[in-house]
Image (tube, rainbow, N blue to C red):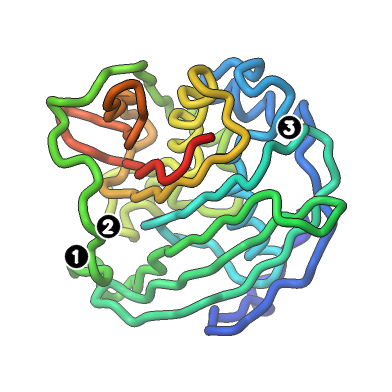
Amino acid sequence: MNTATQEEWIEPYKGYQYQPRPMTVEAEEQKKLLELCAIDPAVFKGCMDPAGFISLAIQEGVRNRIHANGTVNMINRVIQHRQMKLGEPLTVTGEILSVEEVPRGRVATSETWFSGADGKPALTSRRASLRPDASRVGTRGAGEKPQVVIEDVTRLKTIKSYTLTPEGVKAYTGPHNPIHFDPEAAKRGGFRAPIIGGGQGVRFLTAEIWKRFNPQVLDMDIYFRRPIFWDDSVTVMVDEQNGVWKAIGLIRDGKVHTEARINQLA
């Protein structure tokens, strides 16, 4: 992937727009990433995994000179407006919606749009990410904390557990954000060890959703509450009410690390 040099990076600002670009997700590309997560690619029945677009949206920012170095996902809304077939041509563009100063640095909110050949939206990814200030390591506070989605872990239904490895996380992540593969960069960001990218964790959630529902439309608000380290084990758990999945999350030691409110599943 062609990216800007260090001298060409720009600081994100409200209203900054990405250049439209044709792109697609090929079957082999998705297969490789899913297998690194110990997920069977056949789960998605030849369609694109919407969780993959979290990383693709970040990479699109990088292509447009917004660096991802040391940034931490906080909130991501993913709306799959329709299923997308692997290899289908798409057009991607995006915009920085806001930049807010917080005690730990700055929070940038962006929205990235993926459209089909008909020009209609296929998927929307809206992301709020913390851009830590190295001089403020140890400072708490990254803006207003969103309302908790999963209030009682003991009421959740256990679906499946996954164990991460440093080797798998490094292979999945690629070279764009050392906080996911460089222990020293992780420490500078205030973490004991490298953390997985938010999109990698969400793949565990969408895989279980697809096994059960294979949805045409999916709308989720995803919250990254606690870091998941590259050597952690996590369990997918679901808030199921009368056969309806209201929320889904990654749980470790009885605590919610990633949680998603399911707004629509059709």
Q: Which residue is mark 3?
A: 29
Horizontal and vertical percent position of residue 233: 31, 24
Q: Residue at x 71, y 64 (%)?
A: 63
Secondary structure beneath dot 2 equals loop
Amino acid type for the residue under numbered disc 2? Gly
Do labels 1 and 2 touch, CB within 8 Å? Answer: yes
Decide if residue 95 is on the left or right side of residue 224: right
Q: Which residue is mark 2?
A: 190
Instruction: From this view, report whether residue 81 is shown above or below residue 253.
Output: below
Secondary structure beneath dot 3 equals helix
Q: Which residue is mark 1?
A: 138
First in residue order: circle 1 vs circle 2: 1
Horizontal and vertical percent position of residue 266: 54, 34
Decide if residue 116 is on the left or right side of residue 60: right
Closer to the camera in the image, 167 or 35: 35
Do labels 2 and 3 touch, CB within 8 Å? Answer: no
